[in-house]
């Protein structure tokens, strides 16, 4: 901050002269023979005060008549030239860049020898409805609706008999209710891949639903029901695609696996974890793996007026932490200075008021916006194309909304608080549960250390109920086979939609497979509009009939695209500066 000292004026000085008196600059105008210089000390200004006057002219010239040096027009133009160059660079990068990589140069994709007809698609729809009507609910890791899960086992054998009788498909039940299908390709030299989904769903009561959550009611082209989006739609869709390929006598060259977990909603320890252990024991290494995750977002991102697809290349870690305080109990009539509730409330408040650091640019989220930059409207496209300049601004904007804030930092959510038994008793203890979703650039231990530093109170005990680190970031450049196969399939099925890497803020079964592959891609081939996002785990979950048909087509095309032995050579359309 620049401070102007207050002038010590004598009674005869004008306000204008006082300003000059406090600026320690010697202004000279040589060709007039006048110089503004410090004069002698004067009594009017007090001892030691300096005064400026014109020494070369006995009649001092008024301040407003002084002539000061003029700047050269060239010097004045320099800032304008610099600004013009900056604008040129910004616009050039905006309208010439197509993202860090434009990907391989693909030829025409393989097409099915026989397209599914209306009758076949009608079967697809009814098969999904039948699965939705089975309430395969996971309430907790020790409380699953195993009766419904056994019914689901029987159901898929009934509607997909070919999968259980095919000579090159092996089926195993894992953990009682999960399924592993091993599809043997004709070329053993090609590294296999895997597709994941899960059959269990979160609980749902009738309250708030327009139609019962397990009725699979079809209304106005939509099928309503728990699991249509998460994730029974994909589970049935993958099996439906494989079943159709068998009907048209398709035999893959590349082997692949299909894993259908039964307890993903409660961490997948008895389903996906056991499937992964089974494959690891067999020495299986995967070229890539797909699972649920991000999706096609239609105007969900502000400033983007057409749909885009995000592929999750990592997912956040997780900590469930308990904070507890133990103090002496007492009567409310003579309360102590500090109570267990007060101490814990202060600790929780400090966590909420001091969020984890903004880590924009430390994970794939920067690449998300760089690659999607051309899809934004003006002027957001200029900002996103020039994150070398605007990254601090973008990071501040993103943290302003809960949905985008979750992309750029480890989030803190206080989910439970327990204390007190009676209004006039000071409780001896209080506890709170805090859930952290860990950004890919953080670790579990780093988050714990930050929490301890933020609370800074030894009376608050920290206990970790469960925790795991974020998953490694899977490769997403033009040479990444799995990423490019998934991206190519998105563009084949969903009309050349732009795709980009992203961070999956939730957790999936895929985390159990990190020992089998470094290339894990979390993408659900579902079309989401802003009003649909809250339907996942919410009320009125639904999928359009057309959307489900596209979902099945996605897996049909993915299996065919994965027949590619090597990626085509890459090309670049970006112009790096």
Image (cartoon, helix red, strand yellow):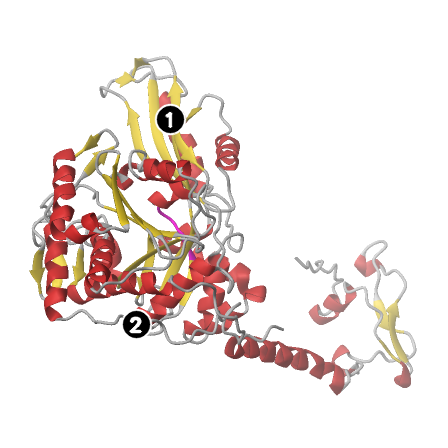
Would you identify the image quadrant in which residue 221 lies?
Answer: bottom left
Q: x%, y% of residue 58?
A: 90, 79
Element at badge 1?
helix
Residue 35 visible (yes or no): yes
Q: Quadrant of the C terminus?
A: bottom right
Q: Nearer the viewer, residue 143 or 208?
A: 143
Image height check: is 34 above or below 16? below
Q: How many marks?
A: 2
Provide residue 543's location: percent of width, then percent of height. Answer: 18, 60
- State whether residue 208 appears in this view: no
Task: Give the residue at x 39% y 67%.
Answer: 488
Place of residue 185 in the rendered image (x, y in percent of width and height, measured from the top left): 35, 55
Task: Decide which of 142, 406 is in the foreground and name it.
Answer: 142
Compared across the picture, whether 111 is left or right of 547 comes to right
Is 41 on the left-hand or right-hand side of 17? right
- Distance between the Cα atoms at labels 2 and 1? 66 Å
Q: Quadrant of residue 574?
A: bottom right
Q: Which residue is mark 1?
A: 342
Name the residue rendered at 11%, 54% in the picture. Answer: 129
Instruction: State the image coordinates of residue 50 (x, y, percent, origin top left).
Output: 84, 61
Task: From the viewer's side, name the closer residue of 115 and 64.
Answer: 115
Magenta range is 502-507
383 in magenta = no
Classify mark 2: residues with Cα within 10 Å, few (<14), some (14-19) or many (20+): few
| Sequence-first disc among 2 and 1 | 2
Q: Quadrant of the N terminus?
A: bottom right
| Residue at the disc numbered 2 | 111
Residue at image position (18%, 67%) is 546
């Amino acid at each position: 901050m620049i401070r102007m000292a207050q002038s010590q004026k004598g009674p005869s000085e004008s306000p204008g002269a006082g300003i000059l008196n406090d600026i320690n600059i010697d202004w000279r105008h040589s060709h007039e023979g006048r110089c503004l210089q410090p004069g002698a000390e004067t009594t009017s200004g007090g001892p030691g005060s300096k005064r400026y006057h014109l020494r070369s002219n006995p009649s001092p010239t008024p301040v407003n008549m002084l002539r000061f040096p003029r700047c050269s027009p060239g010097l004045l133009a320099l800032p304008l030239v610099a600004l013009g160059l900056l604008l040129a660079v910004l616009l050039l990068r905006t309208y010439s860049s197509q993202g860090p990589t434009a990907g391989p140069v693909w030829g025409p994709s393989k097409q099915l020898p026989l397209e599914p007809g209306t009758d076949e698609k009608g079967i697809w729809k009814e098969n999904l409805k039948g699965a939705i009507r089975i309430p395969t609910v996971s309430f907790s890791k020790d409380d699953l609706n195993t009766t419904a899960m056994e019914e689901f086992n029987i159901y898929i054998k009934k509607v997909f008999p070919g999968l259980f009788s095919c000579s090159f498909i092996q089926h195993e039940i894992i953990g009682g209710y999960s399924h592993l299908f091993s599809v043997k390709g004709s070329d053993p030299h090609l590294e296999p891949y895997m597709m994941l989904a899960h059959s269990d769903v979160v609980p749902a009561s009738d309250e708030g639903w327009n139609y019962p959550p397990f009725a699979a009611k079809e209304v106005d082209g939509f099928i309503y029901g728990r699991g249509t989006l998460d994730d029974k739609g994909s589970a049935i869709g993958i099996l439906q695609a494989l079943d159709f390929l068998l009907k048209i006598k398709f035999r893959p060259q590349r082997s692949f696996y299909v894993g259908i977990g039964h307890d993903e909603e409660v961490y997948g320890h008895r389903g996906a974890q056991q499937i992964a252990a089974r494959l690891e024991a067999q020495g299986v290494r995967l070229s890539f793996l797909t699972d649920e995750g991000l999706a096609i977002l239609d105007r969900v991102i502000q400033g983007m007026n057409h749909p885009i697809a995000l592929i999750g290349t990592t997912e956040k870690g997780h900590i469930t932490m308990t904070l507890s305080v133990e103090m002496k109990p007492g009567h409310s009539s003579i309360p102590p200075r500090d109570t267990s509730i007060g101490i814990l409330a202060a600790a929780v408040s400090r966590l909420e008021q001091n969020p984890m650091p903004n880590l924009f640019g430390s994970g794939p989220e920067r690449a998300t916006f760089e690659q999607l930059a051309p899809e934004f409207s003006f002027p957001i496209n200029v900002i996103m194309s020039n994150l070398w300049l605007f990254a601090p601004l973008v990071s501040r904007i993103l943290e302003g909304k809960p949905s985008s804030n979750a992309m750029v930092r480890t989030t803190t959510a206080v989910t439970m608080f327990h204390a007190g038994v009676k209004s006039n008793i000071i409780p001896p203890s209080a506890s709170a549960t805090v859930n952290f979703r860990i950004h890919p650039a953080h670790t579990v231990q780093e988050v714990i250390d930050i929490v301890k530093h933020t609370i800074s109170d030894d009376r608050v005990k920290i206990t970790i109920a469960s925790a795991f680190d974020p998953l490694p970031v899977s490769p997403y450049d033009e040479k990444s086979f799995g990423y490019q196969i998934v991206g190519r399939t998105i563009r084949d099925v969903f009309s050349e939609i732009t795709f980009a890497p992203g961070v999956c803020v939730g957790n999936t079964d895929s985390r159990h497979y990190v020992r089998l592959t470094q290339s894990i891609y979390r993408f659900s081939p579902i079309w989401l509009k802003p009003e649909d996002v809250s339907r996942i785990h919410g009320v009125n979950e639904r999928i359009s009939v057309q959307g489900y048909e596209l979902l099945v087509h996605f897996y049909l095309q993915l299996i065919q695209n994965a027949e590619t032995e090597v990626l085509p050579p890459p090309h670049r359309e970006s112009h790096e500066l």
